[in-house]
Image: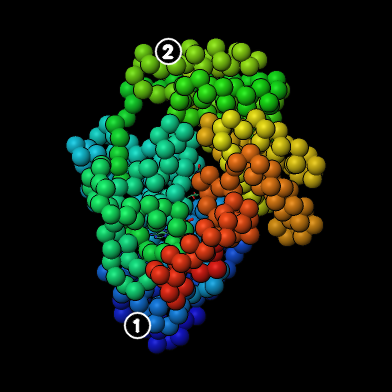
């Protein structure tokens, strides 16, 4: 609990109804979709930039940590208030402020759920491409602070590629406006990029200007099975190398498909060692041509069966397997680690092979799921966090997976971020000078280290 005088000062800013500090309330804000927990001392729901700008100097004066929170769907521990203090939860600051299709932008508050923005844009014939699997729960503020990706980011790019500008409250309480509504804007440092992936360690984002794009005319989707995992990964690398850029190319290995089929009974090919879900979008004729070339490529790589969606319902059904992979493995649990190792796409076949070898070596039951077209692999590892032996074994396997990615010029995270889960591995991919450079930036912006302390910087 915060000191009574500090609590009263904060309540003066937001009112008692938007200030929580009963233990049963705090318990709801001390975790995310990773394995650790740490209860804050207070949870505050701001409604405006002015309130955030009033709260931060109070926290700074008393050296109270402040951790921003969207929906808490992070899978790396990023919003866990590991040094307690205040959680600033943005679920009530969730208005879509402006939609402008002529100038192709949307202005939103940080608590807007990604899927709600999409629902606002669809009737206008537009969409916002980044589509994390958590699209119906996670917030734009959280997406920006973790630079989230998703299946269709293969063709369209990740969150940062759509951030035109933002309003940020710095720890001092000063409000800065970074970027603008212009699609092109080269005016000084691109400071908004600094906040993409900053995990709430530099400033609190209170408004975001996003680029939006017209909906494609049509889409074509296929699911392809291979008798060999390596062949499916080779097909991915070959399709991309041949100059075709699908919207999505998702890979699922045999363990993943078997578990999904076991739960959902979708009629998936459980004999397949590797399954690809491939989608193209755009003008009908272009889709037709691209899909024909993709079909040739997968046949060259030994595809044993191919299902093509004829209707929108069929398409939804094919995507259902992919979308339910996470909950299916979470159910095996009781807990789940979703890894996020990433390599250049030409190295996907080697990396998939390595991951499977390492999982087998440590006898770790896990499915391999990948946004394979952009080299982003998500081993889904059901674990029991209360079992120290099992956790130690899984930890060793994960460490080895990261080690295996380095010689392939890979990295620790393609989209989930570092949070608590991966800070120990940071030196594997970032030299001392670069880490020090991040620390210099952090110290300059947040000298008292009140914003999300105890994380990667
Ligand atoms: C089922 C499932 C599927 C997922 N699929 C994907 C996927 O496909 N791609 C992907 O990239 N991720 C995925 N994720 C991970 C997660 O959903 C994303 O990282 C998402 O961006 C987190 O958003 P959130 O609103 O839940 O943020 P939170 O988890 O609440 O917070 C994330 C980080 O953002 C910071 N933050 C939040 N709001 C602000 C703010 N206003 N100002 C400053 N910092 C802020 C927090 O401090 C924290 O560091 C998935 C998670 C689940 C559970």
| Relative horizontal placement of residue 58, taking residue 339 as reference (left or right) | left
- The residue at the far front in this view is 433
| Relative horizontal placement of residue 92, taking residue 23 as reference (left or right) | left
* Label 1: how many Cα within 10 Å (few below 14, some 14–19, many 20+): some
Q: Quadrant of residue 346?
A: top right
* Label 2: how many Cα within 10 Å (few below 14, some 14–19, many 20+): few
Q: Quadrant of residue 131?
A: top left
SS for callout 1: helix
Label ID, residue 9: 1
Of residue 433 and residue 82, the one placed in the foreground of this image is 433
SS for callout 2: helix
Of residue 262 and residue 251, the one placed in the foreground of this image is 251
Residue at point 32%, 72% (across, down):
173
Of residue 206 and residue 387, the one placed in the foreground of this image is 206
Residue at point 48%, 39% (across, down):
150
Query: Marks 1 and 2: which is nearer the front?
Result: 2
Of residue 454 and residue 126, the one placed in the foreground of this image is 454
x, y percent for residue 368: 65, 37
Q: Is mark 2 within 8 Å of ligand 1?
A: no
x, y percent for residue 52: 33, 69
Label ID, residue 289: 2
Res. 262 visible in picture: no
| Relative horizontal placement of residue 145, taking residue 101 as reference (left or right) | right
Q: Vertically, is 187 above or below 149?
A: below
x, y percent for residue 256: 66, 34
Q: Vertically, is 244 above or below 30?
A: above
């Amino acid at each position: 609990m915060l000191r009574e005088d500090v609590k009263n000062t904060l309540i003066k800013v937001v009112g008692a109804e938007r200030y929580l500090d009963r233990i049963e309330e705090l318990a709801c804000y001390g975790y995310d979709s990773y394995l650790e927990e740490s209860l804050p001392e207070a949870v505050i729901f701001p409604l405006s930039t002015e309130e955030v700008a009033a709260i931060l100097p109070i926290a700074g004066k008393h050296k109270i940590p402040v951790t921003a929170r969207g929906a808490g769907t992070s899978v790396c521990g990023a919003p866990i208030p590991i040094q307690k203090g205040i959680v600033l939860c943005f679920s009530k600051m969730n208005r879509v402020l402006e939609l402008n299709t002529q100038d192709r932008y949307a202005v939103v508050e940080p608590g807007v759920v990604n899927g709600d923005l999409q629902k606002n844009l669809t009737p206008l014939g537009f969409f916002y491409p980044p589509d994390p699997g958590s699209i119906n729960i996670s917030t734009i503020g959280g997406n920006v602070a973790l630079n989230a990706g998703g299946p269709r980011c293969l063709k369209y790019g990740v969150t940062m590629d759509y951030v035109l500008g933002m309003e940020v409250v710095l720890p001092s309480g000063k409000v800065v406006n970074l970027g603008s509504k212009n699609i092109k804007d080269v005016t000084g440092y691109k400071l908004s990029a600094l906040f993409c992936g900053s995990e709430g360690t530099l400033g609190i984002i209170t408004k975001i200007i996003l680029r939006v794009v017209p909906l494609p005319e049509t889409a074509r989707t296929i699911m392809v099975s291979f008798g060999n995992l390596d062949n499916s990964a080779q097909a991915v690398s070959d399709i991309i190398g041949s100059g075709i850029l699908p919207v999505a190319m998702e890979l699922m290995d045999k363990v993943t498909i078997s578990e999904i089929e076991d739960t959902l009974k979708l009629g998936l090919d459980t004999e397949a060692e590797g399954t690809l879900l491939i989608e193209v979008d755009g003008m009908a004729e272009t889709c037709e041509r691209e899909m024909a070339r993709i079909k040739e490529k997968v046949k060259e790589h030994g595809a044993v069966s191919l299902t093509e969606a004829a209707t929108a319902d069929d398409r939804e059904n094919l995507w259902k397997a992919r979308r339910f992979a996470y909950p299916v493995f979470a159910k095996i649990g009781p807990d789940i680690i979703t890894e996020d190792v990433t390599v250049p796409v030409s190295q996907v076949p080697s990396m998939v092979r390595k991951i499977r070898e390492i999982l087998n070596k440590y006898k770790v039951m896990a499915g391999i799921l990948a946004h394979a077209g952009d080299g982003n692999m998500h081993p889904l590892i059901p674990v029991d966090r209360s079992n120290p032996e099992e956790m130690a074994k899984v930890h060793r396997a994960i460490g080895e997976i990261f080690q295996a990615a380095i010689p392939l010029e890979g990295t620790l995270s393609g989209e989930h971020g570092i949070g608590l889960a991966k800070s120990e591995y940071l030196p594997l991919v970032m030299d001392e000078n670069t880490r020090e450079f991040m620390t210099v930036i952090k110290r300059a912006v947040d000298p008292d280290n009140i914003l999300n302390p105890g994380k990667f910087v």
